[in-house]
Image: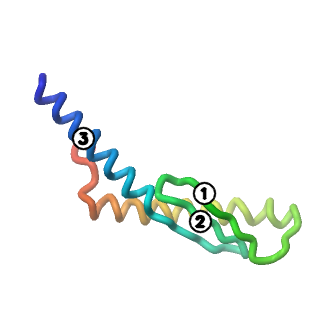
Amino acid sequence: MFEKLKQLKDLRDKAKTLQNALGAETISADKNGIKITMDGNMNVSAVVLEKEMNKEELEKKLPDAINDVIKKTQRVMAEKMRAMGGLPGM
């Protein structure tokens, strides 16, 4: 029983280390004149509009830009997790 608790603690510690390492990563994507920067924990840290856009243009282009940076972030994080050995047993 204690061995299982130790394994759980080790897994939790590794997950926390991995989360901290991923949070330190910064990924940016530029699409349709919108640049979005996101960290490895999927928090948006900046949105820059490269040109003046009206509300309709923003409503049309913003979802694509957000989805683009999310996909890019997920790819980078998956590679980083593989490089760090991932989480055993998951």
Label 1, on which residue?
44
**Residue 53 location in percent, x, y?**
84, 70
Q: How many marks?
A: 3
Q: Residue at x 23, y 35 (%)?
A: 9
The secondary structure type at the circle numbered 1 is strand
**Quick one: quadrant of the N terminus?**
top left
Image vertical order of residue 90 relative to residue 30, above or below = above
Query: Contact, CB < 8 Å: mark 1 with mark 3?
Result: no
Label 3, on which residue?
11
**Residue 52 location in percent, x, y?**
84, 74
Query: Contact, CB < 8 Å: mark 2 with mark 1?
Result: yes
The mark found on residue 37 in the picture is 2
Q: Is residue 58 left or right of residue 86?
A: right
The secondary structure type at the circle numbered 3 is helix
**Residue 76 location in percent, x, y?**
42, 65
Tell me how far mark 1 sits from mark 3, CA to CA: 28 Å
* First along the sequence among labels 3 and 2: 3
Tell me how far mark 2 sits from mark 1, CA to CA: 6 Å
The mark found on residue 19 in the picture is none
Label 3: how many Cα within 10 Å (few below 14, some 14–19, many 20+) = some
Q: Nearer the viewer, residue 68 or 51?
A: 51
